[in-house]
Amino acid sequence: MSSNLLLPDESSSQTLRRRLLAIAGTIILVATYLTLIITQPMGIVEGLGQGVALGTFAAYLAAAVLLLLAVLPDLPVSTLTLIPVALALNIILGQFVGSVMIPLYIDSIGTVIVGFLAGRRAGAATGVLSTLVWSLFAPTVLPFAAGAALVGFLAGTAARFGALRRIYLTPVAGLVAGVLVGVVSSPVATFVYGGTSGVGTGALVAAFSSMGDSLLSAVTKQALISDPGDKAVVFLVAALLVYALPKRLSGSFAFVRRYRVLGKRVSK
């Protein structure tokens, strides 16, 4: 009986603690992102042998850990199993598409799936972790961790407000997310990475630059062309994969049940 009387206070305390962890993780993410843009550090894309790259990696890792700790109590075992699969999916697809003449990325399907199933914080943490793992053998992606986190956050937000209940809403949500992510990623691509992040996207930047645009203007235009289309495709593919999951599996996610992410498609 006494233990039951303590439950409300314990629940409030745990909720507050998790919110504080999420806020701390978000602050570290934003602060690291702004620091990269303002300082424009040299050597950031030369690997963890450089102090600035190691510091950036450590800051983003701390943010990802704090976000995961904030959401961990809500994550079923299936999510903890899903995150490594999502990381591998992001890296394999992103590495392949980045080497061909396609002005897209397709490197966030795994992040979006986690956001759809487990919510904003889990999606954001997955985006950051994916970038960190990828940066171990492709250091040039490290500065884009904040943008990857934003993708996961926006995926969770879209799912929370019903974007998966109608299939035609999903790519629309992706288009909106792509505009926001493009705006956030453009300064990083410009000031840290010199404006190119893949064969196809780099070709667009070069084309705009040849027309007389400044580097920032060229990168921003490229991002506003590539990112909305990329995220529309990614959100749609991720939604189809979520729809294909067994109802028992998708229904095991508290986030899916709480916000009726799939409407009447699932029930526990």
Image: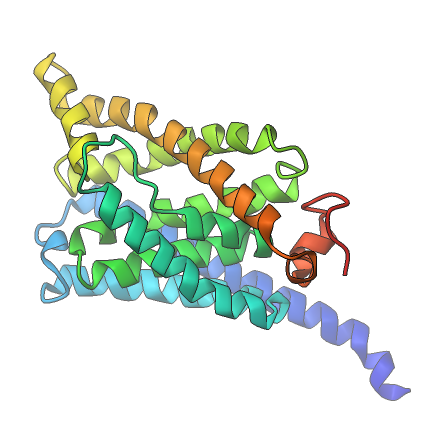
Residue 198 visible somewhere in the drawing: yes
Q: Quadrant of the N terminus?
A: bottom right
Residue in the picture at 51% in, 30% down: 171
Residue in the picture at 23% in, 49% down: 95
Residue 134's spot in the image, x, y percent? 26, 58
Residue 144 visible somewhere in the drawing: no
Q: Residue furthest top?
A: 211
Residue in the picture at 54% in, 65% down: 79
Image quadrant where residue 78 sits: bottom right
Residue 187's spot in the image, x, y percent? 25, 35
Q: Is residue 117 above or below residue 202?
A: below
In the image, 152 versus 110, the foreground residue is: 110
In the image, 15 versus 202, the foreground residue is: 202
Image quadrant where residue 15 sits: bottom right
Image quadrant where residue 245 sits: bottom right
Q: Residue furthest right?
A: 1
